[in-house]
Image (spheres, rainbow, N blue to C red):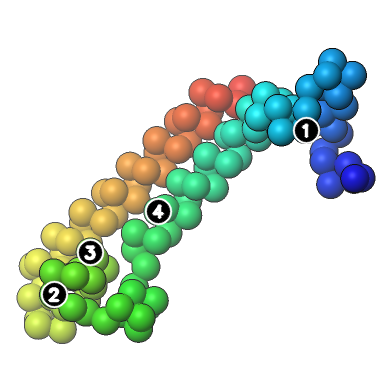
Amino acid sequence: MGDAHIPGAVAHRWHRGAPNGASAPRTFLTVVLPLSWPAVFAGLVLAFAHTVGEFGVVLMVGGSIPGVTRTIALAIYDDVQALNYAAANEASAVLLLFAVTVLALTYALQRRTLPL
């Protein structure tokens, strides 16, 4: 198996585990994953934040079934359709606050984990 896809710093540490008798899964869990964890974590958080505000797929696939497929994005849509702008503004503010909080926490954790 070639290691052309492994960046230099990780490849160097990856090959250090082999002479010490570490298996490939153990080397991955003890070397590669800890080195790449900040990027993996950021990707997971951004994917989660993106799906929270997902609108189109939920509406097309799940429909707007009250009590079953109710998401905050669908609640905003339903409130706007009903001309209930106050409720739509409140839900939008909650969604905005959640997104900013998640991104700020991710940024803070990344700065603490990765010294620049």
**What residue lies at 40% left-to-right and 61% top-to-bottom?**
51
Mark 4 in CB contact with mark 1 (< 8 angstroms): no
Residue at disc 3, secondary structure: helix
Residue at disc 2, secondary structure: loop
Identity of the amino acid at label 1?
Ala
Residue at disc 1, secondary structure: helix
Residue count near mark 4 (Cα–Cα under 10 Å), binned few <14, some 14–19, many ≥20: some
Mark 3 or mark 4, which is nearer the start of the sequence? 4
- Closer to the observer: label 2 or label 1? 1
Q: CA distance from mark 2 to mark 1?
A: 49 Å
Residue 72 image label:
3
**What residue lies at 7% left-to-right and 75% top-to-bottom?**
84
Identity of the amino acid at label 2?
Pro
Identity of the amino acid at label 4?
Ala
Identity of the amino acid at label 3?
Ile
Q: CA distance from mark 2 to mark 4?
A: 23 Å
**What residue lies at 21% left-to-right and 79% top-to-bottom?**
64
Mark 1 or mark 2, which is nearer the start of the sequence? 1
Image location (x, y in percent) of residue 75:
18, 70
Residue count near mark 2 (Cα–Cα under 10 Å), binned few <14, some 14–19, many ≥20: few
**What residue lies at 58% left-to-right and 41% top-to-bottom?**
40
Mark 3 or mark 2, which is nearer the start of the sequence? 2
- Closer to the observer: label 2 or label 3? 2
**Residue 75 falls left or right of residue 105:** left
Residue position for label 2: 66
Residue 49 image label:
4
- Closer to the observer: label 2 or label 4? 2
Residue at disc 4, secondary structure: helix
Residue position for label 1: 24
Q: CA distance from mark 2 to mark 3?
A: 12 Å
Q: Is residue 83 above or below residue 35?
A: below
